[in-house]
Amino acid sequence: MKFTKFDTLERLRKFMKTNPSWVSGFLDGEGCFTGSFQIDKGNTWGLQPQAEFNVVQNNVDRLLLEALKEDFDNRGGVYARPNNTSVYSVRKTKDLREGILPYFISYPLIYNKARELERFYKYLDLLSENKEIGNTLNSKDQFLKLALILKELNGKRLVGHKSDRLDLIIDWLNNLTDVPSVEAKFNLREGAKQLKLSKKENDLF
């Protein structure tokens, strides 16, 4: 019995090109739409929003990730990660809106991952408006909208200190009545660090 092997980048690319629904089905199980906030003292409101589509695989399947990158017109990149894994990651908002989302409109995801994609699309739409840029309370409220969408988007994967960190940011934004001082931003960063350290300490017992 002879089995077909896709053991070269060329063969994988050819298969993906002629079987886009397989790609969509694979990403329905393995793909991840997510977002986060980097705490940045240089930002007016102390936060830098980020968005990401990624796929993580064991290093033995890194070739598959390279083929996916080419299938998405070389948007994003493939990077090494700990524990013998690699990730295909796309973070630029333009690449996500123009390359990733249209693919799943043509070849839809199903059920939970489809709902996740809808939240991700809403998150990207808000990011594209750039209304979080500025020093008005309306700008702050835009950050709060982004944070609340992330809480829904990441609900199933946010556990431990990551969930607490997002709650900390949401509470912090809710209580702001003006542009925060550098000291306030520093305190937010230190509070987030303490949550992470506390989680590590608890894991030891």
Image (cartoon, rainbow, N blue to C red):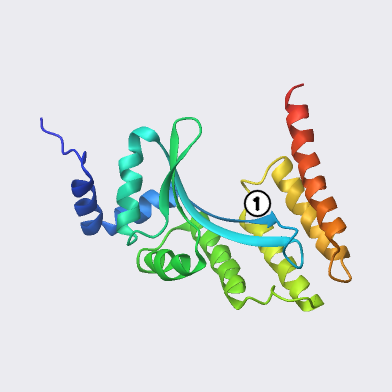
Splitting the image into 4 quarters, where does residue 63 fall?
A: top left
Which residue type carries mark 1? Gly
The quarter of the rendered structure image containing the N terminus is top left
Could you say which is closer to the camera, residue 112 or residue 129? 129
Q: At x 68% / y 42%, what residue is drawn?
A: 159
Count the labels in the image: 1
Q: In the rendered image, which residue does mark 1 sit on?
A: 155
- Percent x, y of residue 49: 64, 62
Asked if residue 34 lies left or right of residue 73, the reply is: right
The quarter of the rendered structure image containing the C terminus is top right
- Percent x, y of residue 190: 81, 46
Q: Residues within 10 Å of mark 1 (few under 14, many from 20)?
A: few
Dot 1: what SS? Answer: loop
The answer to whether 164 is drawn above or below residue 137 in the figure is above
The answer to whether 187 is drawn above or below residue 60 in the figure is below
The answer to whether 42 is drawn above or below residue 136 in the figure is above
Splitting the image into 4 quarters, where does residue 143 fall?
A: bottom right
- Percent x, y of residue 96: 46, 65
